[in-house]
């Protein structure tokens, strides 16, 4: 026997479970049954696709309660685990985002609220310590020679692991139950009536028989094959939690059925919150694929595009081969057809939410909008339906706006949809580029997601209105008739500044977009933005540095004074320094990075010293 320590994060998580933050402790049994069901699916798949020699004639889950010994046992004859897998899966939380999970759990614990987060991190097994003061697991991997493995822990800092010579293939989990404490919602989980009630509520749809003695407790009916009128929302919600490992109810349920030349059924769910790994490359994504009620694949990416990777659910196709491979799926025209129809249905469902349930839609877009906008890059054919369900922050109101709403509010004579990208709302709103637009009452979309820097170049227009960055190209807003043209000739000064700043800028010109700031930097219409250039560098794609245009506000005292100083003495050694300071302040005003911050700080300090 070997005694090992839990990983630090696992210890913290166990402590939270032992001193449970969950008022509904019944869900521990749901988690054990869900894990057992997954193990049975994996064994059947291994036999079907990998040729594993295994008996799959009676795959089942067995529950055994001993009221005298105060134990509850959940047993399956599924794939089982090796010793290494037991240590990796139970002794360690081998998942990214662990710190985030623990922080949220601790916060919920302090607030004594429900923090239904455990399942989506793949560590639902730990929920057993809400009801047990000791847990024993015995397992043996199918297709392996020799002995099994015995794991045991009291949910504290360590666990023991040893050989189990006579272990059958599969996994057996035995809980040594704590005393009943109904004030703490800790019920008698050795009570058969309680067990039947929990299984019926949470696990009735499991496709394998769940047995208690000689009685099968679950109906094993495929939820997606039953008419929606015959299925309660609670049943749908429990099925969603089973396939997603989320512990919260879904935001929306989508049923689909296609008959004719190619038949399939689908049951999809839109979650109510984004998973912790939504933007991580190694995250599991895709739908479950069944063929004639037989589970085939757990995360079929071929059935749903990556920008809808948050959608959970099952697709049951009637006309595919049971031993279909991922390679065949990628080429199968029926799968491509299903994918197109699923996408169309999901996007139309979201669009319906915009009018039928604005609160649900707002939740959806807050959680998943950033991912959905990736579709504007990957699926040009779906630009229109994606843009129709998109919402954007705007200068015109506190609530996000649709593009259709923006177009309705456009000023008379305005032909383009104006937007500005940036790292935050405050940065965008306070940008010098915004000044003339704000002064003249033009609405500007505020785009702060990283993907916004890219998709705006991939989408030419919406409803015939071109999308236009107010930080690129020249601006020619209709001027007030009383606005005065700048006095004097700025040509010589602009030429001087271009010469002194030649390494930094491609052009220096007077601005029509500034009202209060002295200067700003503008990208040429066809050049990539600095933020996009930075993103490419972060991905290791070093391209040529793009010079930008320095625009000056001729009505600003600094610019007017600089012109006068240049006219008095073009050889004044302070002028080149002023040019550097002018460029640096324009760069800082838009949130850019100075190439030499120390030099800029020294120039500024020297200049300030001469004024006091």
Image (tube, rainbow, N blue to C red):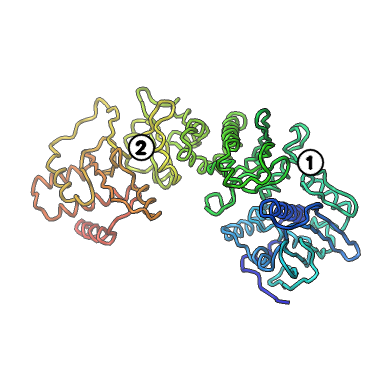
Q: Residue at x 86, y 58 (%)?
A: 64
Name the foreground residue: 144 vs 594.
144
Residue 271 x, y percent position in the rendering = 63, 43
Using residue 573 as the reference point, say whether residue 14 is left or right of it: right
Q: Is residue 488 visible?
A: yes
Viewport quadrant of the C terminus: bottom left
Q: Quadrant of the N terminus?
A: bottom right
Q: Is disc 2 surrounded by few (<14), some (14 to 19) or many (20+) residues within 10 Å?
A: many
Image height of 271 relative to 135, above or below = above
Return the mark for residue 289: none
Q: Is residue 74 left or right of residue 239?
A: right
Which label's residue is closer to the chain start, 2 or 1? 1
Q: Is residue 585 above or below residue 554?
A: below
Q: Which residue is mark 2?
A: 469
Q: Nearer the viewer, residue 27 or 226?
A: 226
Which residue is painted at 42% across and 47% down in the image? 423
Residue 582 visible to an observer of this rendering: no
Instruction: Where is residue 90? Give x, y as percent.
Output: 68, 64
Q: Position of residue 447 (x, y in %)?
A: 43, 41
Residue 221, label in figure: 1
In space, the residues marked 2 and 1 are separated at their CA atoms by 54 Å
Q: Is residue 270 left or right of residue 396?
A: right
């Amino acid at each position: 026997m070997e005694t090992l320590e839990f990983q630090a994060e696992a210890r913290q998580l166990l402590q939270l479970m032992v001193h449970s933050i969950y008022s509904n402790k019944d869900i521990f049994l749901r988690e054990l049954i869900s894990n057992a069901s997954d193990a049975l699916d994996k064994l059947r798949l291994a036999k079907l696709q990998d040729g594993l020699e295994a008996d799959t004639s009676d795959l089942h889950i067995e529950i055994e309660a001993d009221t005298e010994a105060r134990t509850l046992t959940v047993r399956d004859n599924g794939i089982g685990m090796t010793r290494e897998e037991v240590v990796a899966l139970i002794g360690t939380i081998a998942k990214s985002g662990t710190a985030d999970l623990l922080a949220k759990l601790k916060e919920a614990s302090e607030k004594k609220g429900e923090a239904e987060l455990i399942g989506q991190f793949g560590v639902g097994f730990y929920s057993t310590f809400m009801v047990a003061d000791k847990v024993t697991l015995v397992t043996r991997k199918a297709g392996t020679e020799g002995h099994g493995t015995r794991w045991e822990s009291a949910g504290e800092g360590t666990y023991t692991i040893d050989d189990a010579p006579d272990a059958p293939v599969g996994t057996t989990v035995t809980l040594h139950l704590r005393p009943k404490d109904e004030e703490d919602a800790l019920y008698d989980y050795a009570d058969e009536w309680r067990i039947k009630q929990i299984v019926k509520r949470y696990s009735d749809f499991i496709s394998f028989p769940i047995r208690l003695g000689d009685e099968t407790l679950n109906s094993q009916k495929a939820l997606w094959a039953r008419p929606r009128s015959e299925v309660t929302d609670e049943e749908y919600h429990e099925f969603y939690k089973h396939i997603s490992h989320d512990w919260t109810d879904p935001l929306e349920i989508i049923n689909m059925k296609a008959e004719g030349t190619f038949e399939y059924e689908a049951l999809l769910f839109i979650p109510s919150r984004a998973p912790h790994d939504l933007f991580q490359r190694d995250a599991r994504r895709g739908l479950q694929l069944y063929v004639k009620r037989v589970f085939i694949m757990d995360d079929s990416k071929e059935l749903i595009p990556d920008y809808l990777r948050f959608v959970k659910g099952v697709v049951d196709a009637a006309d595919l081969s049971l031993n279909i491979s991922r390679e065949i799926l990628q080429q199968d025209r029926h799968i491509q057809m299903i994918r197109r129809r699923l996408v169309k249905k999901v996007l139309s469902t979201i669009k319906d939410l915009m009018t039928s349930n604005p609160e649900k839609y707002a939740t959806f877009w807050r959680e998943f909008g950033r991912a959905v906008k990736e579709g504007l890059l990957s699926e040009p054919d779906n630009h229109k339906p994606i843009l129709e369900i998109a919402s954007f922050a705007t200068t015109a109101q506190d609530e996000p706006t649709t593009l259709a709403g923006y177009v309705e509010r456009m000023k008379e004579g305005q032909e383009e949809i104006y937007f500005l990208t940036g790292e935050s709302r405050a940065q965008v709103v306070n940008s010098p580029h915004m000044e003339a637009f704000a002064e003249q009452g033009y609405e500007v979309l505020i785009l702060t997601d990283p993907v916004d820097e890219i998709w705006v170049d991939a989408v030419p227009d919406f409803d015939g209105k071109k999308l236009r960055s107010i930080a690129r190209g020249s601006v020619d807003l209709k001027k007030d008739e009383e606005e005065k043209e700048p006095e004097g000739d700025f040509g010589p000064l602009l030429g001087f500044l271009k010469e002194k700043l030649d390494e930094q800028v491609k052009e220096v010109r007077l601005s029509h977009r500034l009202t209060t700031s002295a200067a700003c930097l503008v990208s040429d219409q066809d050049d990539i933005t600095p933020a996009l250039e930075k993103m490419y560098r972060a991905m290791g794609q070093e391209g040529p540095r793009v010079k930008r245009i320095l625009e000056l506000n001729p009505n600003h005292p600094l610019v007017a004074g600089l012109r006068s100083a240049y006219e008095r003495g073009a050889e004044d050694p302070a002028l080149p320094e002023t040019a550097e300071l002018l460029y640096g302040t324009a760069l800082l005003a838009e949130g850019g990075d100075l190439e030499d911050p120390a030099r800029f700080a020294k120039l500024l300090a020297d200049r300030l010293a001469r004024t006091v």
